[in-house]
Image: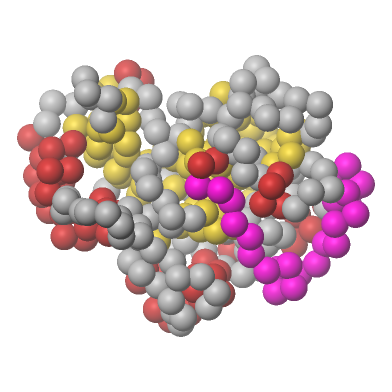
Amino acid sequence: MKLCRFDDDRLGRDRIGVVRGEAVADVSQILDALPTVRYPRPPGDALIEALPTLRPEIERLAAAATPTPLSAVRLKAPVANPGKIVAAPINYQSHIDLDLVGSDIAHAHIISHISKAGLFLKAASSLVGPAEGVTIAFPDRRNDHEIELVAVIGRTARHVTRAAALDHVAGYCIGLDMTVRGSEDRSFRKSADSYSVAGPWLVTPDEVGDPGALEMRLAVNGRQRQKANTRSLIYDLPKLIEYASSVYTLHPGDLLFTGTPDGVGPVKAGDVIECTIERIGSMSVPVR
């Protein structure tokens, strides 16, 4: 199943859809099944947490809905309320070897193995969908694109073993981790509004299969810049979930950006970034 958030209804509320081919079936009625909560709101995204239970009804609603062409809707990030965005730095050897050798990228940061670099957090407020696009926050500095596979956590995970890690994944989407180059800490340089793009939809694990064997590529204005396969990850997804959950409690809706390969490069206002990951789809992201 491909689940998306799109447009707004007449009251300004999110609409939820199931993508089938080149059309979207509106299943927003499913939101009425989510529990009403009181303050303090529990951690996690309620729809992602309830997805296994609600899926049969979502599919029934989708089958009965009148489809809308994908070209007629604006796609938002597929998760509305991630508690946190966890990201893996330098998780492809090609990125270390080919990209991070220039002073205009490294800026005296020590480039090392992920086991020494650890993970980092991006602000949840940096998350947008492909239709919203990227707004350059540092126009006087180099702003780079980084395509990444993103895993959406489906249930609470703490000290999860590698063997059980993928059981905690609700689905996958394409991630665009934007970063400004400079001397500041990663989380600052990567957390500006719109610097975390996720989309175009969430694809459930049954449609993706092995997340460790996915082709991915990125082009800017039609010219390819990045191409790789997730089999080249230094820490694959099960290892990343094991690693992350040893430090953070992961909640439903949390996003795990898995790292980017070589080929990162600068973009500017007016560019269009095209991102594709096998068995997930493609998204077109304008830069403003």
Left or right of residue 253, residue 110 in this image: right
Would you say residue 113 sits in the magenta stretch?
Answer: yes
Q: Is residue 157 visible?
A: yes
Residue 85 vs 133, above or below: the answer is below
Identify the residue at image location x=33%, y=66%.
155
Q: Is residue 215 visible?
A: no
Residue 230 vs 194, above or below: the answer is below
Q: Quadrant of the C terminus?
A: top right
Colour convention: secondary structure
Identify the residue at image location x=62%, y=38%.
192
Identify the residue at image location x=12%, y=43%.
32
Q: Which residues are magenta?
A: 101-124
Left or right of residue 5, residue 194 in this image: right
Identify the residue at image location x=38%, y=30%.
75
Would you say residue 127 sits in the magenta stretch?
Answer: no
Q: Closest to the observer: 225 or 62?
A: 62
Give residue 33's position: percent from left, percent from top.
12, 49
Quadrant location of residue 74? top left
Give residue 143's position: percent from left, percent from top.
74, 34
Residue 9 vs 170, above or below: the answer is above
How many numbered tags mark residues here? 0
Left or right of residue 46, residue 215 in this image: right
